Amino acid sequence: MSEGRIQFRNHDDIRTLFGSRDMNLRRLRDLLHIDVVLRGDELHLHGEQAQVDLGTEIVSELRSIIERKGLLDDADLDRALLRGQFPPENADATADEMIDVFHKARKIRPMGKGQRDYIKAIREHDLVICEGPAGSGKSYLAVAMAINALRLEQVRKIVLVRPAVEAGEKLGFLPGDMLAKVNPYLRPLLDALSDILDFDQVQRYMDKEVIEIIPLAFMRGRTLNNTFMILDEAQNTTVTQMKMFLTRMGHHSKIVVTGDGTQTDLPDRVESGLNDAIRRLQHIDGIASVTLEVADIVRHALVRKIVEAYDDRDQGHLIDGSASLSRNGHSNRGEPNGLHRNGNTPTE
């Protein structure tokens, strides 16, 4: 039986960690099969050595989040606890996979093989295209890697880009200037930034244009050197828009393109630039394609089940339909629907 200790600065932080009716504490104990005892402002973890070490690491990360944000939301808790479902294969590999960002003691770890392959691809290639379901960490890990590159002075600027496409709803007239009008489309990228960095730090970088968040249309005509560019929600780009974005790459720059081909909001029979780029660029050296799976989802535990339920239903339609169409409006027969992590088309 081993013991781990984590010191907290006050009881308020401990209450935040425990959650309503100690729900967070119960989840931690049930996941790792350890005992947690509170003595003053110190938590004592008891159990098998490996589980205690993992529990100490998780609680320490949660403590840092609470001290930084003053609260602990469900997304932070789910992300930290998911680590217990994917124990590291060995300590050396885990150390290499950690993503250092600016905040003191703040490190981000990939959860599972898919995310590890994704991070490795970003480190080794100047252009990475990542397709995967909602909640699989596509955008979050790309933003973390961009901040890491900025921290290591590998780039001087981060540009986060999204197509301004309405998701089936008509928003009508939006008040304010141009930036206020496009803010709803860009907000998810700002949320990812704010989750990793302090709000004041994000604001300083944006004021100095070290970090820029812009709609895809604003990229036309630019050439960006020493820049880490991320195109999010790329399934909503047309083929022409994708070509325009990819050709913005200047010297010493890196591009990550992320998207979920099953959630395209383009008009019917308009081909997605994401699907086209995966097919068109798959054999070019220096470009990596990564496909994340349902198993890589790191949001609320129900999200994985929801995605599986929708995938099962869509698969049923493909089996029953005699001439079903793919999400880009073309026949599915004879067309690859994506790439595996090794860059090859799926085996029939």
Image: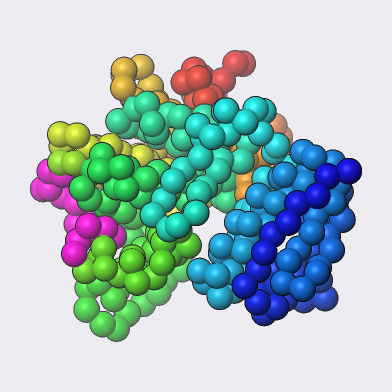
Q: Position of residue 133 (x, y in %)?
A: 57, 44
Identified at 52% across, 25% down, the residue is 341
Q: Is residue 217 magenta?
A: yes
**Could you tell me which quadrant the N terminus lies in?**
top right
Q: Is residue 43 magenta?
A: no
Foreground residue among 109 and 40? 40
In the image shown, does 191 or 51 lie closer to the viewer? Answer: 51
Given residues 217 and 141, the one toward you in this image is 141
Please give the name of the residue rendered at 29% of the width and 76% of the height, measured from the top-left corner. Answer: 180
Q: Is residue 329 above or below residue 101?
A: above
Q: Position of residue 258 (x, y in %)?
A: 42, 43
In the image, residue 311 sits, relative to residue 195, either above or below, namely: above
- At 33% from the left edge and 66% from the top edge, which residue is drawn? 201
The range drawn in magenta is 208-224
Please tell me in which quadrant of the rendered image residue 149 appears. Answer: top left
Nearest to the observer: residue 118 or residue 166: 118
Compared with residue 208, is residue 150 higher up or lower down, i.e. above or below? above
Residue 272 x %, y %:
39, 41
Q: How many marks?
A: 0
- Could you say where residue 259 lies in the image, as x and y percent from the top left? 45, 44
Does residue 162 appear to the left or right of 221 in the view shown? right
Which residue is drawn at the image coordinates 32% and 48% (left, top)? 151
Q: Quadrant of the C terminus?
A: top right
Left or right for 130, reference 87: left
Q: Is residue 232 visible?
A: no
Q: Is residue 281 above or below residue 200?
A: above
